[in-house]
Amino acid sequence: MTASASTSRLDQVAAFLGDLQDRICAALAAADGTASFAEDVWQRGADTQTAAASPPAGAPSLGGGRSRVLKNGAVFEQAGVGFSRVGGEHLPPAASAHRPELAGRAWTALGVSLVVHPRNPYLPTTHMNVRYFEARAEGQAPVWWFGGGFDLTPFYPFDEDARHWHTVARDLCAPFGAEVYPRYKQWCDDYFYLKHRGETRGIGGLFFDDLNAWDFERCFAFTRAVGDGFLDAYLPIVERRKATPYGEREREFQLYRRGRYVEFNLVFDRGTLFGLQSGGRTESILMSLPPRVRFEYGYVPEPGSAEARLAEYLTPRDWL
């Protein structure tokens, strides 16, 4: 593949991701009804990370991004939606741990990643990410793949929400083969698993990585389907749960369970680790963390309580 063809492919993915960020931010702001997203445009320098005056299109090879954060809304306590297009001349060995043959290659990574932390404990936290990675070496074909997915983390779960979430996931996978949803649903259950707790992070969804088994166009089409499907999966749950009455007990339990989110992101999440190891922008990488959280030693919910019921949902199952 020529350098111009590779650049065209990167630009094609970047155009979709930039538009996806715009659409998701507009939809979440409308669902909240009171707050809007503040944008932080940044460039990734060789040694420093500096604010930029314009979006990352046409930025230097090291790239940049747009971090958008909604704070203190009526529905969302915090929502972060980030777009980035970054790269470098040599992929650090630490950042290529699972693909050591790529160490030292020139690379580009593009993605949109979001985490939404609602205010109401009856409304689940959610995460979505779609991304593209390409590594290049002189005289060799580029190595590329897509990755991404979305997952849901309820505190007070509802079966109808879980069924809806997984129905959207199954349906968007269907045009790509009957085996796709079961495979990526299982991968999500396995990936978002806190080994030291013996529980899943939530009720799962879809997760895929290193996707290049199909040709580029089909892989890109599937990634677009995942990105486009997120709002179909999440917004109906927002409308059903955002006005549910709650009190201090539910709020305290929500803050306690957010601690599991922190544990997973800082210990296991590949995106977080790659971003930090490759010299990414720390504020953008860690905007996935909740704005408020609490940890409590030896917490055990009261047997038979709504809080104890959550444990039944933190093990993989067929939600459909």
Image (spheres, helix red, strand yellow):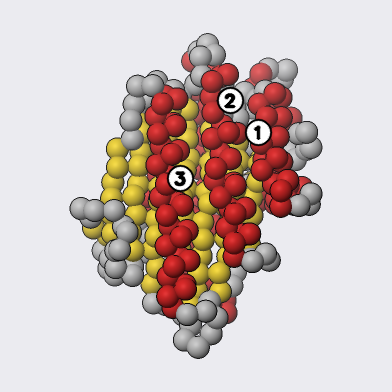
> Crowding near pointer 3: few (<14 within 10 Å), some, many (20+)?
some
- The numbered mark, 2 or 1, whose residue comes first in the sequence reads 1
Which secondary structure lies at badge 2?
A: helix
Q: Position of residue 282 (x, y in %)?
A: 36, 54
Please tell me the numbered disc located at residue 237.
2
Q: Nearer the viewer, residue 107 or 276?
A: 107
Q: Nearer the viewer, residue 178 or 264?
A: 178
Which secondary structure lies at badge 1?
A: helix
Please tell me the numbered disc located at residue 1.
none
Q: Position of residue 226 (x, y in %)?
A: 59, 46
Which secondary structure lies at badge 3?
A: helix
* Residue indicated by mark 3: 20
- Camera-side mark, 3 or 1: 3
Q: CA distance from mark 3 to mark 1?
A: 19 Å
Q: Are marks 3 and 2 in contact (CB under 8 Å)?
A: no
Q: Are marks 2 and 1 in contact (CB under 8 Å)?
A: yes
Q: Residue at x 44, y 32 (%)?
A: 27
Q: Residue at x 29, y 42 (%)?
A: 39
Q: Residue at x 59, y 72 (%)?
A: 99
